[in-house]
Every structure is written in C-alpha cells, then in structure tokens.
Amino acid sequence: MLAFRDVELLPVKTVGNAGTETIDVNVTDPITEMGVYFKVTNYTSGAAEYPPHRMISKIEIVDGGTVYYSLDGHMALAASAHDCGKFPTGWWDDGISVGQYIRLPLRFGRYLGDEEYAFSPTRLLNPQIKITWAINTTYHTTAVSQLGVVLRLMEGASLASKMLAWKEIRSFTTVGAGEELTDMPRDLPWRQLMVRSAYLGTTYQHESSISNYKLDCDGGKFIPFDLGTLILKDLMRNQVPIFERHGKWYVAHGDMRQTWMGDNPFTLGAGLSDCYSWGFHNNGSPRVQVWGRKLDGSDVSDTQMFYQIHGWMPSQALLYRFGRLNDAGSWFNAPQYGDIRLWMKQAKAGATATIAVQQPRQLP
C-alpha cells in the first residue's frame, strides 16, 4: 500500500555566510518532492532587494561525477512555481533584524505522488544533494542564516527508473545586438524549456534584452518555434496560472521595489493603519513604484505596509512547454535530431541570462 511521509533529510541548521552543504541522500523510498529551506536575517534597510532565493547560487543532485539536477536560486524558484502551479512558500520583508525565508519545492514527477517519475536514490551509488550559497554581508546579518531540506517520500512505491529533473545548459550576459546561439542537448526528450533574462534593479522586461527566439533542428528540418518574445509570453500566459506572493515593505513615497515577477504584475497594499492611502505604478515591469500618502496629504516615510503581488514569469523566466505535460510520448523528442540550436536575438546589453531544460533522466 502506498503511503506518503515527510522527513527532514537536513534539519534546519545555522550556516556560515557562504559555502556548500553536501548532504548524503540516505533514504530508501522514492522521493516525489524535495523542499529546500533557506533563511536570511536583515541587517539594514534595502534587504528586500536581496531575498533568500537570490543568495542561492546552485542546487544540485549528483552521483559522483554525474549531475542529475542543477539550477541556481532564481531558476529553482521559477521551476518550482511552474511545476507546482503556485509561487513557492516564503516571506519577503525589508525590516531591520527581520528574517526572510524561502521553501523551494523541487518536484521530480509530473505531479506530486507520481510513481512512474520519481527520484529513487537507491538506484545510485552515492546520491548527494549540494546547495551552494553566499549571503550579502552588507544587507544580511552574518553567521545566522539557516538551511534545511525536507523530503516527501512514497513508502510502498516501486523504485522509479526515471525522474524529471531541471538542468542548467548555460548562463551568459547579453550584448546590445546580434544573435546568441546555443547548442542544446540531444541526449533525452524535453518536457519544458526555460530562459531567464533579467536586469535586477531596473524596470527592463525580458523582451528588452532578448526580442526573438528560434529553436532550429537539423538546419531547418523542424522548427518548433520562431517567434517574438511578446508572442511567446502570451502563449505562456495561456498555459500557466497567474502567480501571487506576499510580503512586507518599509517604504517612503516614490520608492521602487523588485516584484520578482517578470510579466505584467499588479500590486495591492495595505498599511498597518487606516491613515494611509497607497498606489502602485509599474506598467508591467519587474519593479514597482510605491505611492503612499497620509490622509493629511503628506508623503509617507519609512512606513510599513503589507503587499500582494500578482503576475507571471517568476524570476523573469520565460517558460515554453512541449506537448501534453502528463504524456511523455508528446514531449519534444530531441534524440531524433543531429543538431538542435536555440537562436536568441539580443536587443540590449547587460542582462543576466540562463537557459535550462527539464528532461526525464534515466536512473540506473
């Protein structure tokens, strides 16, 4: 009989300002989901721009020299949101001496509890999880950050021979013009493709840096898409839910804040007193400007407010899905081609871009 249970593979512990935690995966039951918890404590104002997921530089699942899963915190947040259909649990707060945390659910099946696709650690010789981080010591209190890992196990399930896993293909910095070419993997089918392009601290959107995408197989033999970024964003909106997240800011009238959404977010807010009125301006950009006034007409200053943000493209990552999500036979059959290239037309220099694919990884 199938039974689910949750176990702490790594009980929450205090970690240093930077490092890599290597954790042996010493469970015998298949894992349908892994939750990575990371918490930072704010040292000074402005820490809302440095939330915990931004401090994670890599999450990996490895077996010796074989890497099964690999994403940074930005991409892991986006992948978790799309795979689970909701923004990951967390709290964003820029109050001094206040904690911010994220719990990233990394799912290994088509859905929670998928017995056909799951991470079966006993099929590997030395399965390990590696998490690398580095806090911002200007904005975060040193020596108090916390890390933990929880696994959702399927007791009684047979050992799955394959798992769905995201893997980074490459990262680069955009230039002002020209096409960026990436040779893509052909070893396994693709279920989903994701590209992040972001200028943190600015109002530039994804299409500001990459205006067009083309996926080309065997020199034009098959082209799954050759479209502008704005069209691809529309297609994505029709396939994924609108996401929502919450938090608390300390703001003055006119302050700018990062939404951690990349597409048409809108914001609602409420102060801790009914003596304030709030407005927000963003024009769909990944940053929002806060307008706050007291009832006497004067501007607010260093005033705390709770907010609710709605939007698409968590971490400014564009998602493209292949076929029917639960039907492996409809996924993009990359191994049948001799050459697969992703062409990106660049429009503005200086954005940080990352490409990742989700594939059904075979387990020995």
Image (tube, rainbow, N blue to C red):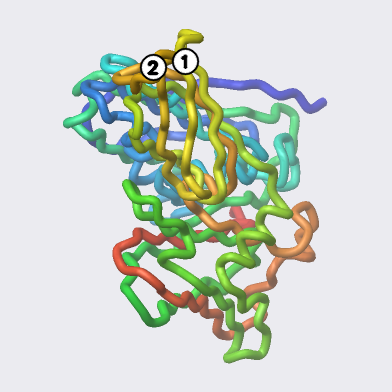
In the image, residue 123 sits, relative to residue 275, either above or below, namely below
Could you say where residue 177 lies in the image, as x and y percent from the top left?
Answer: 36, 79
Above/below status of 210 relative to 250: below
Q: On residue 271, which mark appears?
A: 1
Residue 131: tell me if it is visible: no
Helix, strand or loop under label 2: strand
Residue at 32% over, 25% down = 252
Task: Identify the residue at horizontal 61%, vertical 40% (top origin).
Answer: 107
Instruction: Name the residue nearer the viewer: 309 or 168.
Output: 309
Dot 2 or dot 1: first in sequence order is 1
Residue 131 % position (x, y):
37, 38
Please say whether residue 267 is visible from this viewpoint. Answer: yes
Left or right side of 234 for 176:
left
Q: Which residue is mark 2?
A: 304
Compared to 187, does 287 lie above or below? above
In the rendered image, residue 105, in percent from the top left (x then y), is placed at: 56, 34
Check disc 2 and give the amino acid type. Gln
Q: CA distance from mark 2 to mark 1?
A: 6 Å
Quadrant of res 153: top right
Q: Nearer the viewer, residue 277 or 69?
A: 277
Q: Position of residue 162 (x, y in %)?
A: 65, 52
Image quadrant where one finds the C terminus? bottom right
CB atoms at circles 2 and 1 under 8 Å apart? yes
- Mark 1 is on which residue type? Gly
Q: Nearer the viewer, residue 270 or 342?
A: 270
Residue 301, quarter of picture: top left
Q: Which of the pair 304/75 is nearer the observer?
A: 304
